[in-house]
Image: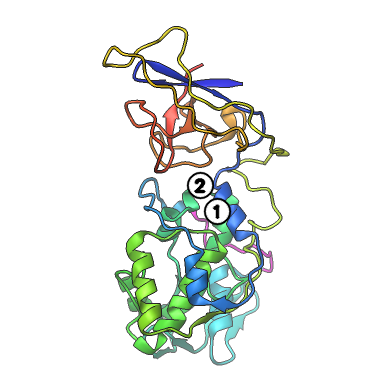
């Protein structure tokens, strides 16, 4: 199969092997490994640093407070039961926590009214979206929003403190209780690493500085692979087809027989970047949903659709000129 990307009067011809493209494949691959305890600085160094993806977030994209295990208790009630420092009273007919006592580690307050308790996503849903979850499937986002397999993902805290945190990362918010900072940083790092999420430069820099100055001996406890990411073919919102990865024979931009010049009237240079031994994952044009033209994407040469139009994940700018560095974006493809 071949797709072309219009580029200043030059058509970039891309030869693509027919295998299944998986949205968010890079982050999925990073999260499928069981992690053995290690020092926080080493784990931090393993996390990808890149600009955040700031488009398209809606809280409804993360189906939260679900009952994923089918035991009749939604995630909020499960955490209220788990985090109560006294034996909670639970209505057995509807799995509702009637009473309990909760210690908010963010501010050191003890809460006795469940209405004062928020269940905080340590890495907020919007922060997760901006850091890579935009490329996950619906089921992967739901698994993240309701993750009870690792206590560091969700925590019961004072509602007002959680409201002040909102979707901020450690570069612009830390818990009021400073003695909890190192634990909070460890939890933040573990969630980001476990789920294959990236950090932006300011977030990474602040955490690195705090580890050096306040938490130099911090160790990240071990974890199991993230649910819905480990051992499960990642999907882009639809059932995944069986995927096999094959070497790409040729992926070199070349001049189209019908268009031979750029805007300057001279022949555009041919990009001969070596790609012979790399691989590319694609699917049929209808297989990738909810892509946003011009937004970041991976892997390069993957296919997506927007309102019925086919797009290619490509390192070309808005005018169609190819570039070597930086991240790829969705660009319109032409047959």
Expressed as whole percent of the image width and height from the top left, the position of residue 180 reads: 41, 86
Residue under label 1, please give it: 27
Decide which of tag 1 and tag 2 comes sooner along the chain. 1
Expressed as whole percent of the image width and height from the top left, the position of residue 135 reads: 51, 47
Residue under label 2, please give it: 135
Q: What residue appears at the point 35 percent right and 83 percent down from the top-left corner?
A: 213
> Residue 86 versus residue 30: which sits nearer the camera?
30
Q: Residues within 10 Å of mark 1 (few under 14, many from 20)?
A: many
Question: On the image, which quarter does residue 29 sit in?
Answer: bottom right
Q: CA distance from mark 1 to mark 2?
A: 9 Å
- For the N terminus, which image quadrant? top right
Q: What residue appears at the point 63 percent right and 56 percent down from the top-left corner?
A: 229
State which mark lies toward you, 1 or 2: 1
Expressed as whole percent of the image width and height from the top left, the position of residue 161 reads: 34, 78
Secondary structure under tag 2 reads: helix
Q: What residue appears at the point 50 percent right and 55 percent down from the top-left corner?
A: 62
Residue 123 highlighted magenta (yes or no): no
Boundaries of the magenta span:
62-71
User: Does the rendering let one see residue 97?
Assistant: no
Q: What residue appears at the point 49 percent right and 59 percent down from the top-left corner?
A: 197
> Does residue 96 lie above or below 309 as drawn?
below
Main SS of the magenta segment? Answer: loop
Judged from this view, the residue extending furthest toward the left is 264
Q: Are marks 1 and 2 in contact (CB under 8 Å)?
A: yes
Label number found at residue 100:
none
Residue 70 highlighted magenta (yes or no): yes
Q: Residues within 10 Å of mark 2 (few under 14, many from 20)?
A: many
């Amino acid at each position: 199969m071949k797709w072309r990307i219009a580029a200043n009067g030059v058509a970039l011809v891309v030869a693509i092997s027919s295998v299944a493209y998986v949205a968010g494949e890079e982050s999925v691959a990073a999260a499928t490994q069981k992690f053995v305890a290690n020092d926080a600085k080493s784990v931090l160094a393993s996390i990808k640093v890149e600009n955040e993806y700031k488009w398209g977030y809606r809280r409804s994209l993360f189906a939260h407070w679900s009952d994923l295990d089918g035991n009749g208790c939604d995630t909020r009630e499960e955490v209220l039961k788990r985090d109560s420092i006294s034996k909670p009273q639970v209505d057995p007919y509807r799995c509702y926590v009637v009473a309990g006592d909760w210690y908010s580690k963010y501010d050191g307050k003890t809460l006795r009214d469940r209405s004062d308790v928020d269940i905080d996503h340590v890495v907020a849903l919007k922060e997760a979206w901006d850091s890579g979850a935009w490329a996950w499937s619906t089921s992967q986002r739901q698994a993240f929003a309701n993750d009870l397999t690792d206590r560091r993902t969700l925590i019961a805290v004072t509602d007002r403190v959680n409201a002040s945190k909102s979707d901020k990362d450690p570069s612009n918010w830390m818990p009021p209780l400073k003695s909890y900072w190192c634990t909070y940083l460890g939890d933040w790092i573990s969630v980001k690493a476990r789920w294959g999420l990236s950090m932006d430069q300011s977030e990474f820099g602040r955490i690195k500085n705090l580890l050096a100055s306040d938490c130099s001996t911090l160790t990240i406890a071990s974890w199991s692979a993230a649910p819905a990411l480990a051992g499960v073919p990642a999907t882009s919102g639809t059932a995944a087809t069986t995927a096999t990865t094959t070497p790409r024979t040729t992926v070199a931009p070349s001049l189209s027989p019908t268009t031979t010049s750029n805007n300057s009237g001279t022949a555009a240079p041919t990009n001969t970047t070596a790609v012979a031994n790399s691989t590319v994952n694609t699917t049929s044009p209808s297989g990738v949903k909810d892509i946003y033209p011009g937004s970041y994407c991976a892997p390069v040469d993957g296919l997506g659709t927007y309102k019925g139009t086919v797009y290619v994940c490509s390192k070309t700018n808005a005018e169609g000129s190819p570039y070597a560095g930086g991240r790829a974006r969705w660009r319109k493809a032409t047959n």
